[in-house]
Amino acid sequence: MRRASVFATTGAVSAFVALAAGALTPTTAVAATSAATIRAAAASSLYASGPYRSDTSEAAKQATALATTDPIGAAAAKTIAQYPVAIWLGDWTQGATLTRTIDAAIAGAERAGTTAVFVTYAIPQRDCGGYSAGGFDEATYDAWVDQIVARVAGHRAAVIVEPDSLAMLSNSACSETLDAQRYRILAREVAAFTAAGVPAYLDAGNSNWVPPAVMASRLNSAGVQRARGFFTNVANYYPTAQEQAYAEKVSAATGGSHYVIDTSRNGQGWRGTWCNGPGSGLGTSPRVVSDGSALDALLWVKTPGASDGTCNGGPAAGKWWSAFAKSLVANARLGTPVATAAPARTAPSVAPTAHRDSVASAAKRRVTVSGWTFDRDDLTKPVTVRVTVGGKVVGTATADASRPDVDRVHRVGRNHGFRATVAVSSGKRSVCLTAVGIGRGGDTSMGCTTVTVR
């Protein structure tokens, strides 16, 4: 990838804040949500306990596939798999496959209390003949979007709409007649997601591509006023502070639109090329942001470890490249503090970073939980982990045990591990772990595990 029928939009509901229960079926009965409601919502309500992390992500699959042939590559993939990465939907994901992919992510996110983040990537003349060329014709694309909307309506989700679709209009490889079609398609798409109660973000390129005023004009033409806002830096490497300064200008020129920034590979900043930048590293881990700006979240949109294309030694676009994944992990800056766009702004409050290692019953009516967590709002204070069964708190753990492996990756100090045994009645139980935030950034769900308690 280089640089990696419309629903009514009247009426206001809070379906995007509430988790839908029951089977994942098209929620045609959900009342339409207004653009004003979507744009005014707090980021914390849209993203709950943060973006969804899938146990079957591409990195997780590679960690298993490479275990015997490339153990170092498998370890790198396993590190990447610990973090939430957006789920890409393209012309390779159609029909029943599209439905299964969306439903699995929505169900997993709802179990974990998190928000599934999807990427649509099949717009006509995608990439204008570049490494990721392809896409549908307009009629096929509209029908495909309608299928996605039907699956996510009424559920907690967010959508990154067509990376490069607007920024690439500056590229001479794109036809001169493409602009009008892009604006028509994108405006229809974001209006449909908004009516379904799902925040959608349009493409705003990055801080070194299109001037803010030009980008804002394109966003307005593509219907950003009917969307949550826009995204920047997808598949690129620019530093977060630079991106936020750019995004704040674009936001101001689009009526205060919210935005998200892709930090999947910007840990080492710009690497001299947009395509498989040598020496690049994982950037700040995905998190919801509350810093007083229009920034909603830092997300990993581009799949770390996936090639940009056959450049700088890489395989075809989208293919896993183990050597690149190793470099990203070796050069990671996962704990880089979120930079602010203005010196006067205080540091943002963030939810804890957390990982569940195990939940098991080794003794009668006892469950032992373990893992690690820290909160950058105050690294000197241990985070409390809440253990719940059937919605009731059955115990807590304090994350103050030595975990040098966590310090090596995140550079936050050693004492952030936890292990505790709590009393749980015998039988098959769903045990859930939550890292309780120290500051104002909210809590972080570590998900739920079904355990047969002795």
Image (spheres, rainbow, N blue to C red):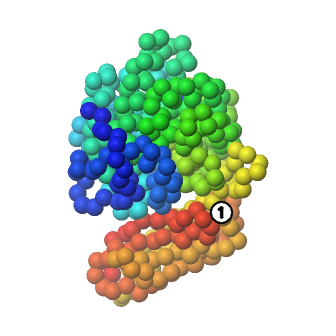
Residue pushed farthest right? Answer: 343
Q: Where residue 350 sits: x, y (%)? A: 60, 59
Residue pushed farthest front? Answer: 11
Q: Where residue 244 sits: x, y (%)? A: 65, 41
User: Helix, strand, or loop for circle 1?
Assistant: loop
Q: Which quadrant of the figure has residue 262?
A: top right
- Above or below, 283 relative to 233: below
Q: Amino acid at mark 1?
A: Arg
All told, the count of numbered labels is 1
Q: Which quadrant of the figure has residue 112?
A: bottom left
Q: Residue at x 72, y 56 (%)?
A: 346
Q: Where residue 270 sits: x, y (%)? A: 68, 34
- Above or below, 345 relative to 378: above
Q: Where residue 225 sits: x, y (%)? A: 47, 36
- For residue 104, side relative to residue 208 (left or right): left
The reply to whether residue 251 is in sight is yes
The reply to whether residue 319 is in sight is no
- For residue 16, side relative to residue 340 (left or right): left
Disc 1: CA contacts within 10 A as few (<14), some (14-19) or many (>=20): many
Identify the residue under disc 1.
376
Q: Residue at x 48, y 15 (%)?
A: 174
Q: Residue at x 25, y 53 (%)?
A: 24
- Above or below, 74 relative to 255: below
Q: Quadrant of the C terminus?
A: bottom left
- For residue 428, side relative to residue 174 (left or right): left
Q: Residue at x 49, y 76 (%)?
A: 386
